[in-house]
Amino acid sequence: MTMRGTSAAVVQLLSVARASGVTVNRTKLAKLLFLADFEAVDRGCAPGSGVEWRWRHYGPYSDSLRDIEADLERAGVVKKVETTNYYGTKEVRLALAGETPQVEIDAKFAEIVERIVSEKGNLSATQLKDLTYQTPPMVIAQKQGRREVRLDLAGGAPIPDLEPGLQRLRSIASALPPLEDEAGAVEDLAAEIGELSELRRETTARMLDGD
């Protein structure tokens, strides 16, 4: 089975880390992937991890990484070890459980991941977090004081999240009574909202691709 998308990016990073003797915990995994994505965009390429990055308490993060971690652990690809670091803080370390599975990943992005891990993999989680805070997407997000927004890796303003508003519109539309003089109007509105959601995804993808 060939892995693709975020799973492939995570496996690729852990594979390079193992070959380089780099210890990876959850925080380091997220920050190294973010830095790889940022460098890819900075070079004019598409971000390779497939992660939608948001500004969380500890910098750029995505909840999808925990889901990927759980899936890879269940599949026996990744093992996690709960331990305590030098400062007495609990942490979860991640590593490949066996041989590296086959992955489908952009060659340029794979090279970026290898270089990022080689150059920055031995930094502590805190140092990596501080480093991500110095990238343009995080600098702009901090200036605007907008946590939980999706980060524009191209360095522009944080991308507005339209989904909560669309969800509210869907709720309103579904609760409206049928219109006697325009049958199907509510259904048309719901369909239009769905189309807007797809347009939002396409627009975000174009922004990230630099089109």
Image: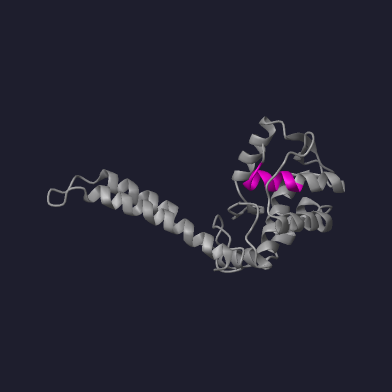
Q: Looking at the image, can residue 133 be seen? A: no
Give the left or right position of residue 55, taking residue 73 as reference.
Answer: left
Residue under the image location 54 percent in, 68 percent down: 211
Q: Is residue 8 magenta?
A: yes
The answer to whether 159 is drawn above or below residue 94 in the figure is: below
Q: Answer above or below: position of 155 versus 13.
A: below
Task: Name the foreground residue: 177 vs 186.
Answer: 186
**Secondary structure, magenta segment, majority class:** helix
* Residue projecting furthest to the left: 181
Q: Residue 22: x percent and y percent?
A: 84, 47
- Is there any visible trace of residue 196 in the rendered image? yes
Q: Quadrant of residue 130?
A: bottom right
Q: Which residue is at a point 57% across and 68% down the rendered structure image?
A: 210
Residue 142 is situated, as x and y percent measured from the top left of the image, at 61, 64
- For image coordinates 70% across by 44% down, the residue present is 103
Count the marks.
Answer: 0
Residue closest to the far right: 21
Would you place residue 68 above or below residue 201 in this image? above
Task: Based on the picture, tell me whether residue 134 belongs to the magenta stretch.
Answer: no
On the image, the x and y values in percent for residue 36 come to 71, 58
Relative image position of residue 79 (x, y in whole percent):
75, 34
Looking at the rendered image, the quarter that the N terminus falls into is: top right
Q: Which residues are magenta?
A: 3-13
Is 47 displayed left or right of 195 in the figure? right
Of residues 207 and 104, which is closer to you in this image?
104
